[in-house]
Amino acid sequence: MKLAVAALVVAALAIGCGGGRGKPPALSARIEQPETQAEKLLALLPPNAQLVVEVDLARLRANPVVGALLTKLVTGPRSPASAGSLHLGAPLDLPADVSGSPLAVAELVILAAYGVGTANAATISLVASKQPIPDATEIGDGLYALGPTDWIGLVEQRRILALASTPIHAAPELLRLRERAMPERA
């Protein structure tokens, strides 16, 4: 009997001291913003990309092994003599209706594909460059977007949120996968 009374007293105290009227838990005073250029671009991507490719062209250009080849491939002049050939030393030939590749001046490129394998498939290219990118939508601070108009609108909305000090991030699972795939000291 004493045990039952003690249990009731403990239950009454627990209910009476439930803390429902107390202060809410304090939120962190500072929410982290993306720090690197790549993290900023990844944060601008609309969610649920099925394929994401990140290429640090500035780093590749600086690489003593592949830098010169990459530079030649993405900036070489079009020439009828090299049409159809892509070998060491050959410039990259583009079809006549392609004005030029943003890769020639880009420092960082992120490609994101949505609806892969469907009739509604779309790809967004986000580019960081110190030079303007022809036919791209400038989204500010040397950042450019290429892709379908509706999708670019989603990128611009996320950029506006970021400028308004609303922390936006890429999906946590994408960031975890990126961290796992990133070479050491990259």
Image (spheres, rainbow, N blue to C red):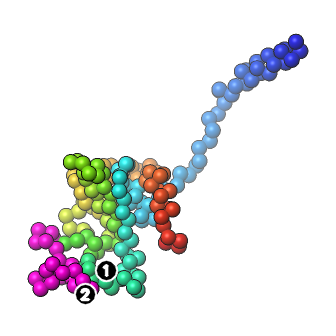
Using the image, determine if residue 30 lies above or below residue 86: above
Whether residue 123 is in magenta: the answer is no
Classify 10 Å Cα crowding around label 2: few (below 14), some (14-19), many (20 and above). Answer: few
Q: CA distance from mark 1 to mark 2?
A: 10 Å
Residues shaded magenta: 77-99
Q: Which residue is at the far right?
A: 2
In the rendered image, residue 129, in percent from the top left (x then y), is placed at: 32, 70
Q: Which residue is mark 2?
A: 89
Whether residue 79 is in magenta: the answer is yes
Classify 10 Å Cα crowding around label 1: few (below 14), some (14-19), many (20 and above). Answer: some
Q: Check residue 70 in the rendering and tell me which mark sits there, or answer none.
A: 1
Nearer to me, 154 or 80: 80
Tag 1: amino acid? Leu
Q: Quadrant of the N terminus?
A: top right
Q: Residue at x 48, y 67 (%)?
A: 182
Nearer to me, 40 or 98: 98
Which is more foreground, mark 1 or mark 2? 2
Using the image, determine if residue 153 lies above or below residue 131: above
Nearest to N terminus: mark 1 or mark 2: 1
Using the image, determine if residue 101 lies above or below residue 180: below
In the rendered image, residue 69, in percent from the top left (x then y), is placed at: 31, 83
Count of marks overlaid on the render: 2
Q: Residue at x 45, y 55 (%)?
A: 174
Q: Is residue 112 visible?
A: yes
Q: Check residue 107 in the rendering and tell me which mark sits there, or answer none.
A: none
In the rendered image, residue 74, in percent from the top left (x then y), is placed at: 26, 77
Mark 1 residue element: helix
